[in-house]
Image (cartoon, helix red, strand yellow):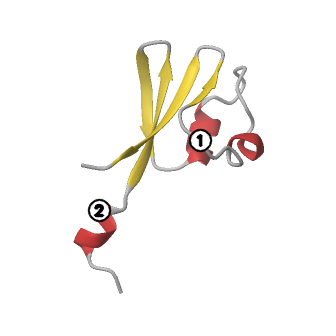
Amino acid sequence: MPTYKERQENLEYFVLLDGDNVLGTFGNLKKVCDFLDGKDFYSYNTIVRKKTYPVIYKNYKVFKVKHY
């Protein structure tokens, strides 16, 4: 069983930007897609299959960052 410190070392967040403005940080992609519900952005099923980050669509960017 991993310790708390080991879990924190492997933790990653998703940062959502609109241009240069940070809209939020999220623990998983589902929450990013729920936040952008109704806006012109990829669906969850599309974005989860993307392997490279940042994911860029129009003016939105999703970065995957390590927890420090």
Q: Does 8 sit above or below residue 32?
A: below
Residue 10 x/y as whole percent: 36, 62
Q: Does 41 sit above or below residue 67?
A: above
27, 7: nearer the viewer: 7
> Pointer 1: what residue?
52
Residue 36 x/y as whole percent: 63, 28
Is label 1 or label 2 in front?
Answer: 1
Q: Which mark is residue 13?
A: none
Q: Quadrant of the N terminus?
A: bottom left
Residue at the location (29% across, 62% down)?
Answer: 9
25, 59: nearer the viewer: 59
Residue at the location (63% across, 38% down)?
Answer: 34
Image position of 15 (left or right of 40): left
Name the residue furthest front: 52
> Pointer 2: what residue?
9
Q: How many marks?
A: 2
Image position of 8 (left or right of 51): left
Please rate how many residues cluster around mark 1, counting C-alpha atoms within 10 Å: few if below 14, some from 14 to 19, many from 20: few
Q: Earlier in the sequence, mark 1 or mark 2?
A: 2
Residue at the location (24% across, 49% down)?
Answer: 68
Question: Which element type, helix, strand or loop, lies under badge 1?
Answer: loop
Look at label 2 and name its amino acid. Answer: Glu
Question: Which element type, helix, strand or loop, lies under badge 2?
Answer: helix
Look at label 1 and name its amino acid. Answer: Thr
Residue 47 x/y as whole percent: 69, 41
**Separation of residues labelled 1 and 2 (CA atoms):** 21 Å
Residue 52 x/y as whole percent: 59, 41
Image position of 30 (left or right of 22): right
Please rate how many residues cluster around mark 2, counting C-alpha atoms within 10 Å: few if below 14, some from 14 to 19, many from 20: few
**Label 2 near label 1: C-beta < 8 Å?**
no
